[in-house]
Image: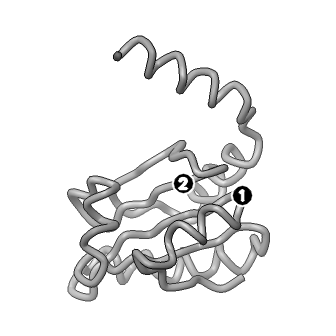
Amino acid sequence: MATVNLTTEEFEKTITDNDIVVLDFWAEWCGPCKQFSPIFESVSEKHPDIVFAKVNVEEQQELAGLFQVRSIPTLVFMREKIVVFSNPGLLPEANLEEGLKSLKELDMEQVRKDLEESQNNNA
């Protein structure tokens, strides 16, 4: 699957309808973002079961705020509507592939349990 441009309006449907979503927060003026874009596109072609979404931080400020994006590029890995990993900075292709492999292997029942426990401890 090629990358898609994600807007605030499409966000909820995208994460609800897809098990795994990888978000690339970027801007037109960002040099590292332009360097990372072909890597993101190339990896997206190898994983048709994953949604690879590009989020332009200047056009989608609400989404950038929701994910507390402070620098770009920033990658966010989501599985079953849960953010499981966030990484500011450019990732080499091998690291992105490794992250996707780990994301697919996650025990989401354990992730939800750990998340609930963490939230209860912070309450």
SS for callout 1: loop
Disc 1, disc 2: CB below 8 Å?
no
Q: Disc 2 residue type?
A: Phe
Q: Is residue 39 left or right of residue 16?
A: left
Q: Residue at x 39, y 79 (%)?
A: 35
Q: Is residue 45 left or right of residue 42?
A: right
**Considering only vertical position in the picture, is 99 above or below 18?**
above
**Considering only vertical position in the picture, is 115 above or below 98?**
above
Q: Which residue occupies the foreground of this view, 29 or 6?
A: 6
Give the CA separation, mark 1 to mark 2. Answer: 11 Å
| N-term mark: 1 or 2 | 1
Q: Is residue 76 left or right of residue 89?
A: right
Quarter where residue 119 is shown: top left
Q: Which residue is mark 2?
A: 77
Quarter where residue 122 is shown: top left
Q: Say which mark, if any, is on residue 106.
A: none
Q: Which residue is mark 1?
A: 19
Query: Around disc 1, counting alpha carbons within 10 Å, would you say few (fewer than 14), some (14 to 19), or many (20 or more)?
Result: some
Q: Residue at x 75, y 74 (%)?
A: 46
Residue 6 pos. (x, y %):
47, 79
Query: Around disc 2, counting alpha carbons within 10 Å, would you say few (fewer than 14), some (14 to 19), or many (20 or more)?
Result: many
Q: Residue at x 51, y 46 (%)?
A: 83
**Considering only vertical position in the picture, is 122 above or below 102?**
above
Residue 123 pos. (x, y %):
35, 16
SS for callout 2: strand
